[in-house]
Amino acid sequence: MAVSKAHVARSAGSGADYRELIREDRIHGSLYTSEAIFKDEMERIFRQGWVYVGHESEIPKRGDFVRRQIAGDQVIVVRAQDDKINVFLNRCAHRGNLLCSDNSGSARAIVCKYHGWAYDLEGNLIDVPYPAGMTCDKQKLGLNALPRVDSYRGFYFASFNEQVIPLDQHLGKATDLIDRACEMSPTGKLRLDGGWVQHRFKSNWKMLPENDVDGYHVNFVHPSFAQAIRSNYDAAAFKNEEDLVSEARYWGNGHTEIDFSKAYTKPLEWFGCDESRFPVYVAKMREAYGVDDGNRKLTAGPPHACIFPNLFLGEGNVGMFEPISADECIHWHTPLLLEDVEQGVNDRLKRQSEGALGPAAFLLADDAVIAERTQQALGESGGWLDLSRGIEREHEEDGVMIGHLTDEVTNRGFWHHYRRIMTGDAEPARLVKVA
Amino acid sequence: MTLAEPRTVSLDERYEIEEFLACEARAADESRYSDWEALVDDDMVYWVPTADGARFPPGEKISVIFDNRTRLATRIRQLNTGKRHSQLPASPMVRTQANFHIERTGDDTYGVRCSQVLYEYRIQSTREMVTWPARVEYRLRRHPDGLKMYFKGVFLVTASDALPGLPFII
């Protein structure tokens, strides 16, 4: 049974004129500071659209679950019978108590700690204490499930909107980016069990997907990194404008990338080493994909891309963007651990993950402060923000818009998709009551 | 030498160790990075785990910070560039440590457990006070020229939550 969420603000409830606020080459600062716009976004983007909720390897066995938050609602992502993955509101159908308080775990049934109502992994109410007083139909008191859950190569997405477009249509060509991440493993499979670190930004959530694929800031926000650390980014990002061969790319539907691969000439250069460091890994990759393709994958390395709206494929990391309010969000990350590789490869991925992302990292700690300063500077009046860089020199190849690493191809793409979503006429989000 | 039973320390040793930790705290509070680094031994491990990660051996899961000596040198080098935006200007900080439990763990080594509360003013960004309560564990080694630390683990009370920037020495 579908239940309408009457308390949720209807689409574009703020009355904001998104066509006016988002132009071809600029956007208005209120898009980062208005709580009313934030509410619109939670409804239009995070409830009516697809959001990333978790990876199959986080919940490998039946009953395994992780807790996540979507648009202010707590959800449980749980593996049920026949490897089906369900996403439920983390809220008892009886009196609304939080069902799972652990961030992750394993359960044979979901039991509420308030009055002991018990649900199976399909969300059906299977037991209530003192049943004699329970005269209503238990069948009608199942958990609220998100009506749409789908996956691509182990990455699970969910939507509150039963009428949402198919996931493959939302991902579009960007499945190539997910393929590229998965195919860093000789089996094509990832193992995202290295743990999560959460980094709190006092900034609007959109600054995360924008900055994570902004190739222009690197020399200015990260000079301390460039000076203190020799890395693969010396060739890929810290260069003069005319010497940079890395590219900014817009893949459609809000999906964006900065591609460093053209700067890499040898296997594992992206990993800050050469192939002699991990001969078993290199041999397995060549065996799995053939010498030429294997070498290509080992040289190009994992993608650096954002899948709209909340998934970050950050080279050796997988990240999630969690909006909290107009001026607060959380950047999550876990290392992109690979199946069937020698331990040293995954250990190095973990250490690089700590180096790059998180509150103490050599890179993201500085990005966070820049985002927080931007949030402060926007203040109440906001004003216009320029997005025009490279608009004259971008070009399209096979449906992907490509520009110089430092050009705002990515952010223009993000915002134009955002405008389409925010001005669209999709149905309001609905939940499905498990029957 | 590894002892079967931890041994208590003399009052002189206790005084010396508390003095060492006060110097360490002050160097960190005042963002004197190289002075702080001078207190670190060659096999140093500097660890700030997440709450989940703290249930595993260091390095098994990703941490907020998991520095070996080389990585720690990089951290100090980056701070010393004077171009690290997240500490420009450096956060004014004050920390207090208390409840020291000190034991001898070998002929020339000591283990210290204590509680720590750090007040950090985020002057470079949000201009908010952040409180960082933690349990801290040290391992110290005596050298001819004094004590050095070869392990510092900071177990944050808030380690299960999203954390604001932590680019300074905690």
Image (cartoon, grey):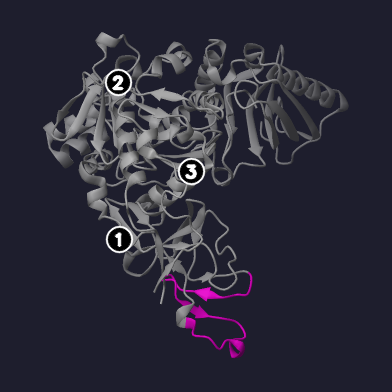
Q: Are marks 3 and 2 on the same chain?
A: yes
**Under tag 3, what secondary structure?**
helix
**Under tag 1, what secondary structure?**
loop
Q: x, y (%) of residue B167?
A: 57, 24
- Say left or right for B30 vs A363: right
Q: Do labels 1 and 3 share a chain?
A: yes
The image quadrant of residue A218 is top left
The image shows residue B127, relative to residue A175, as above or below, that is: above
Circle 1 chain: A
Q: Give the range drawn in magenta.
A: A114-138
Q: Report, in whole angstroms, how far the alpha carbon at label 1 lies from the one at label 3.
A: 22 Å
- Camera-side mark, 3 or 2: 3
Q: Earlier in the sequence, mark 3 or mark 2?
A: 3
- Camera-side mark, 2 or 1: 1
Question: Considering the image in quadrants, where does the C terminus of chain B appear?
Answer: top right
- Say left or right for A207 vs B84: left
| Type of amino acid at the residue the image marks with label 2 | Asp
Q: Which of marks 1 and 3 is nearer the N terminus?
A: 3
Q: Residues within 10 Å of mark 3 (few under 14, many from 20)?
A: many
Residue found at the far right of this picture: B11
What label sits on residue A163 in the rendered view?
1
Q: Report, in whole angstroms, how far the alpha carbon at label 3 lies from the one at label 2.
A: 27 Å
Residue under label 3 = A38
